[in-house]
Amino acid sequence: MINDEIKLNGQLDIVITGSDGTVKETRSEKNLVVTAGLGYIASRMKDASATAMSHMAVGSGTTAAAAGQTDLVSILGSREALDSTTVSGAVVTYVCGFEAGDGTGAITEAGIFNASSGGTMLCRTVFSAVNKAADDTMTITWTITLSAS
């Protein structure tokens, strides 16, 4: 039997750390790869003309994640450049740190993008609030796994 279906699973792990270095909260959330993200993946299979994913953003929007979305509903601050991107087999891992003062507030959404503004959103997730104070730091590790279904 030939298996020709590809499945994408995404998960982000959020860690909020206080100014004293104490971990205040950890959270794992699932995500949605949006339609534009699927088109992006297909275009990268052809060539590398589409710019690589390079930024992550967080926001306060609570609108449910939907396939047709192209940006976050309400970004807190600005998109942050990714700290690292690694590929191991069929797993891509993006890591982004939000320093004190960046992405501050009640965070309820996150997304990955290939530009500091505009560009293509790969995926988006919405979750119950994670509270990041002005002097907290936050690290998001976002893992996308491709598998045959």
Image (cartoon, rainbow, N blue to C red):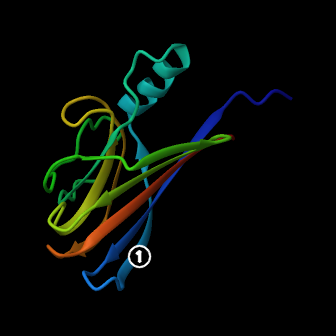
Residue, far front: 20
Element marked by disc 1: strand
Residue type highlighted by circle 1: Thr
Residue 65 makes an appearance in the image: no
> Is 110 on the left-hand or right-hand side of 40?
left
Q: Is residue 71 visible?
A: yes
At a point 38% along the width and 60% down the height, the residue shown is 140
Position of the N terminus by quadrant: top right
> Dot 1 surroundings within 10 Å: few (below 14), some, or many (20 or more)?
some
Task: Give coordinates of residue 49: x percent, y percent.
Answer: 41, 15
Measured as percent of width and height from the top left, residue 137 is found at 27, 70
Foreground residue among 44 and 146: 44
- Return the residue found at the far right: 1
Among the 4 quarters of the image, the one containing residue 19: bottom left
Return the residue nearer the eye: 105 or 32: 105
Relative horizontal placement of residue 94, taking residue 118 as reference (left or right): right
Q: Nearer the viewer, residue 136 or 75?
A: 136
Image height of 6 relative to 61, above or below? above
Which residue is the site of mark 1? Answer: 26
**Does residue 23 lie above or below 13 as drawn?**
below
